[in-house]
Amino acid sequence: MLVLLLALGLGCEALFPPGHEGAALWTIRGRIYLGSEQIDTSSLRAAAVWIETLDLQGYGSVANVAQDARIDPSQAGRFAIGFPRLPPQEVLHPAEILDPALAGRDLRVAIGGLLFYDDRNHNHRLDLLPPGTVEPIDFILGPLESYSLYEFEGDLSDISVVKPGLNIYHWTGPGRGQWLPPDVELFVTLYPLPSLQYQMCQETPPMHDGGAESLEVPPDEVPTDWVFECAPDGRSLTYTYQRMEQPGGVCTDITLISVTAHSALAPGQAPPANWPCAG
């Protein structure tokens, strides 16, 4: 019944080690990979950032409400993020945002994404910034790419594809994807990239088209949480993303460059541990 038309990529203190999440209303489990040796995980936190302002076409511009949890990736990179309360009322929207057929139903939904960040001022929350801000306060280390969070409250009596509470949707292409089971293990690679910092802005900065480019990526540097197109033999792949240039600062105008990345194993080369394609 849900026609997913959204084009969205996109504080509580709680730590629940794997196997001890009983106090959480909902929990996200996964594994962290560090994309750089420069990343300090001592102040690593995760924030579910919920979009507060949506129009009826499903587009959001203001994401100024976040729920926080500290995480400990020390157990072989695994984490369990427990959130002990529901998203605030101001981020719950009528379910017709997802499907006009749901108009009038007693059903609301919060929509957002999961960000990982370095809590640089140690105040236990993601400091979201107003438009025009040049310097970040915290430092975004990575979003959970290609995934969106949906929290449903209300009447789901004849809808079987989602459940009350937290649901995770994996986008596998434009307008395509699938709902994931609640016990799924997610994977995130953290990078200390300045271009990620705009995701702590209260409003999405103005974006401009910067054209397209292509590049070659070494097999051992392919990210783990992208959507890939694998060759039939599993020895090469391509993926696309948007590179951002933001010389004015974190909440100023953005130029978007569409990047097509290609990676291939050399003849006789064994795939690295995180190679996403199977032959």
Image (spheres, grey):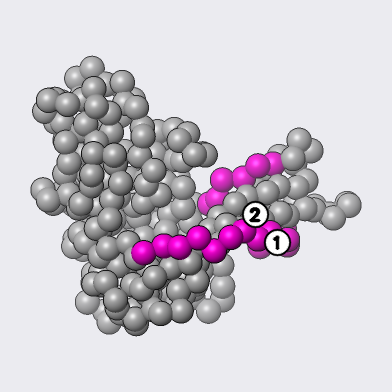
- The reply to whether callout 2 and callout 1 are in contact (CB within 8 Å) is yes
Q: The residue under label 1 is which amino acid type?
A: Leu
Q: First in sequence, mark 2 or 1: give its number.
A: 1
| Residue at screen point 29% across, 39% down | 57
Q: Nearer the viewer, residue 109 or 224?
A: 109
Mark 2 = which residue? Answer: 260
Residue 58: x percent and y percent?
Answer: 29, 41
The magenta segment: 206-230
Q: Quadrant of residue 117?
A: bottom left
SS of the residue at dot 1? strand
| Residue at screen point 36% across, 32% down | 4
| Relative height, residue 180 to residue 136 (above, below) | above
Residue 110 falls left or right of residue 253: left
| Residue at screen point 80% across, 53% down | 265
Q: Quadrant of the C terminus?
A: top right
SS of the residue at dot 2? strand
- How many numbered circles are shown? 2
Residue 107 falls left or right of residue 120: left
| Relative height, residue 165 to residue 216 (above, below) | above
Mark 1 = which residue? Answer: 215
Q: Quadrant of the N terminus?
A: top left
Q: The residue under label 2 is which amino acid type?
A: Thr
Label 2: how many Cα within 10 Å (few below 14, some 14–19, many 20+): some
Residue 177: x percent and y percent?
Answer: 46, 35
Residue 273 falls left or right of residue 127: right
Q: Nearer the viewer, residue 167 or 81?
A: 167
| Residue at screen point 34% across, 82% down | 135
Residue 68 can be seen, yes or no: no
Inspect the magenta stretch and tell me whether residue 210 lies in it.
Answer: yes
Query: Could you give the CA–CA distance between mark 2 and mark 1, rounded to whole angstroms?
Result: 7 Å
Residue 169 can be seen, yes or no: yes
